[in-house]
Image: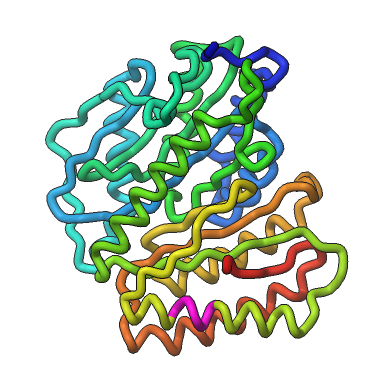
Amino acid sequence: MSNSLPVESVAKLDTSDTSVLIQHLEQAEDLLQILVTTANWVNQPDIYAWLMLPIVASDSDVYVVSRHQLPRENVRGLIEEFLWSIGSTATAYGAAVPAPDVIEIKQASLSSEGTWEPMNEPLFVDVGVATRGKLHAVLRACTVQHAGEDVSTAAQRVARVIGPYVDACLLVARGGGQRVSADGMEGFLEYTAFRHRLQLEVSGLRRNPREMGLLRVKLVPRQEVTAVEQVERAYRMVNALVQSAVRDSDTVGELDEGDIGVLMPNTGPRRALVAAMRLSDALSENPSVSEVLRHFVGVSGWAITGSDVEGLLLETELAVAQAQCASTGAVQLFT
């Protein structure tokens, strides 16, 4: 089986376009601007920000995963900014995040976990941040013409900007994460690898009830105002998910092949849910978001205690009520 992709199946990465994105991200003044800016690039298939479900833990070994060698000083800066950004949040939940003594640069490939041959080396450049072997974020630049140092540098720069905002990195995919390979299989390698990694993280959450607290909201495009029945149904589903998490249940919805969206980890359940609703507003008001795309927001928090449940449900109810005012986005929950 050929492990190459036809040129027409992967859009070309324009270096000037990449620079524009980097510039816009660098000029963003707050998290919402980061989200809106990234939402503008949902239909740009050559820039991906992948964020898995992270667990920030004590005595973390932090390293960067990349296909190509990165300047060591830039890597150190990325790691330092990343640790600084999550430090206060992690400390609030009792997790110490020490600065790393050694930063390792390792070679890795997201597609290597699939059961088929890896994709061509020049096609993908992965830049990631991980602690204790758990992948936090991977930024992927994909192209068939621009490979090597140029693409790697561009990917690292985008990752450096997005790094401090890992509470809400955008996970985007084209056509539900599917690509047409040379033999006609649609994105099997990258999709299988991503799904496998995410399932491993979910399994880890299930094994440790203290870190169990996963909410996943699905946004679907619409033209009409959301019916009251839909809002009430969404709220009931939120309630059920929260209650099951409190009972240490292992009920976690599985990814659907068409799912794309945002994963927001370790912000605390309530803050993350509010941020998810803000993202919903940003996406619904953004004319560049294609109606054929389906968006979901995944919200993972630390342990949801009894004292947190009432407040979480109250804010959920308010957020869902607010979402029905959006002109093109409805809120539903995974079943």
Q: Residue furthest right?
A: 224
What secondary structure prevails in the magenta region?
helix
Residue at 69% x, 77% y is 322
**Which of these two is toward me, 87 or 266?**
266
Q: Can you say whether 305 is above or below 14 in the image?
A: below
x and y percentages locating residue 262 in the rendered image: 54, 53
- Does residue 279 appear to the left or right of 158 in the view shown? right
Q: Quadrant of the C terminus?
A: bottom right
x and y percentages locating residue 254 in the rendered image: 50, 57
Q: Which colour scheme is used?
A: rainbow
Magenta stretch holds residue 27:
no
Stretch of the chain drawn in magenta:
238-242
- Does residue 84 appear to the left or right of 183 in the view shown? left
Residue at 65% x, 50% y is 36
**Which of these two is toward me, 213 or 63?**
213
**Which of these two is toward me, 311 or 201?**
201
